[in-house]
Image: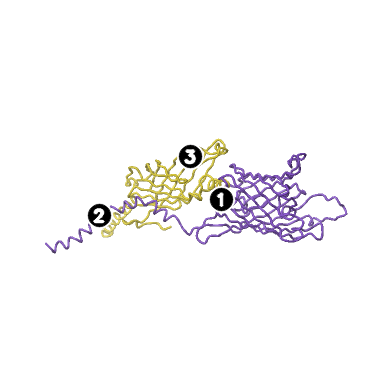
Chain colours: A purple, B yellow
Amino acid sequence: MYMRRSISSPLFTGLILAALFGLTNPARAQNDLLGDLEKQATDPLKREVVSATFKGTHVINSQSIETPGKGTLDFLIQHRFGTLNSGAYEFFGLDQAVLRLSFEYGLTDRLAIGVGRSSQEKTFDGFLKYKALQQTTGSRPMPVSVTLFASSAITTLKFNEPAVERTTASRVDYSYQVLIARKFSPGLSVQLMPTLIHRNYVAQSTMQNDVYAMGAALRQKLTKRLALTADYYYLLPGNTADTYRNALGVGVDIETGGHVFQLHLTNSRGMIEKFFVPQTDGNFFDGDIYFGFTVARSFTIKSNL
Amino acid sequence: MKRSFFLLVPALFLLAALTQAHAQGKYMTKTGQVSFFSTSPVEDIEAKNQQVAAVLDFSTSQLAFSLPVKAFVFKRTLMQEHFNENYMESDKFPKATFSGRFVAFDAATLATAGPHNVQVEGDLTLHGVKRPIQVPATVELKDGQLVALATFPVAPADYNIEIPLLVRNSIAKVVSVRVALTCQPVASAVGATTRPTK
């Protein structure tokens, strides 16, 4: 009797355990099916590219790290009125306007080409933009996005002094930038822009052919569809820095679905690097402020699907 | 001859037992497809997600889905950006999930060929909002793989997805969601030994 009990006891516990196991197992499966799936499906090492650091391909004056993306054609209309302090006769600047029209096309998700025409000095420009590095999340994340930008611009203005012989090469300027940006939070993005402008021809020998500048830009979202923007270029000491001013722009980005409207105030009249980096002469705090806007419209040339 | 026949019979039985185990087992995929369509007088919008993880367990009648919202691909890059940034807020709510069960479905019917209708009910979690839904679906066993299809409507407003006035005419009030999965059997304790390796 005594012996029998000692045998049946582990058997009995075993049965209870088996019953418990049999019961709890499907119950656990019911509750945790989604949890288990998430565990299996989520790869914690997966790196994800941070997107939409800036709303558009331009911040204000500057290009942003963004490109249109593969198969997308962006049409940009950039507009600058005259200075706000030009008085009532000029309707506070609205009587005058300079314009730049441009097309930007994404050959791949990283590489974009663009062409533009500014009414200022009747200038054509062409550029290449390449996303060399993209900010990522996940394991060993890439902290910043880096986009390389190279542009050349040619002035087609007729020159008044026939005495001065101007070759075609003397009409060409080049701009090189390394755009380094980080999206710190869904709302805040900051960009740094070391810049070199090379001018084949300058009017006076004291003027610099090569102008170096350091730019900075930021975007702070106020709501989902409204953001504050600013950009600034600091000219490195030299003749240009002594004669001209640092370009400053402040503005808002308004998104309406298919369009991005960018409204801004800046002391620069030009809208391409060769104008706004070495040739800005307005004093922002004296009211030499140009009101301007950029409208970008995207067209899908090649579908992603 | 006679001997091999004796071997064949249990082998056939074993095979039948295995398929039975299959039919009542667990199926899984990580590359399922979920797409959605919005039709309005202004424009048609379509997006496709090919990174859907799903598990369907016929032994417990349970099923679960999970997908990364950012993996939806649109025709237009800008639309995709807006979808993630403004509508789904994918940084805040990176995943959409569904957890539910088959209503009164006998797993044994899977053994017969052709698609079988089944009612699925459970909770859909989208944009951080969890709502109970009921979805008619079909399941079919094809070459050892489970093919599951479903189409159901989702109203963005139900999930606190705000659509601004300016584009309200371009986005449908009710979006049609289509699920298409091809799941591989998962080896369970009862042993689905013929699990295809991927």
Percent coordinates x, y for residue A202 in the rendering: 79, 57
Mark seen at residue A187: 1
Name the amino acid type tagged 2: Ala
Asked if residue B62 lies left or right of residue A198, the reply is: left
Q: Earlier in the sequence, mark 1 or mark 2?
A: 2
Count how many numbered circles sit on residues in the image: 3
| Chain that bears disc 1 | A
Between the C-alphas of marks 3 and 2, the distance is: 47 Å
Q: Nearer the viewer, residue A268 or B42?
A: A268
Name the amino acid type tagged 1: Gly
Asked if residue B129 lies left or right of residue A303, the reply is: left
Mark seen at residue A19: 2
- Under circle 3, the secondary element is helix
The residue most toward the front is: A286
- Under circle 2, the secondary element is helix
Between the C-alphas of marks 1 and 2, the distance is: 55 Å
Mark seen at residue B157: 3
The residue most toward the top is: B41
| Chain that bears disc 3 | B
- Under circle 1, the secondary element is loop
Name the amino acid type tagged 3: Ala
- Mark 3 vs mark 1, foreground winner is 1
Q: Label 2: few (<14), some or many (≥20) within 10 Å? A: few
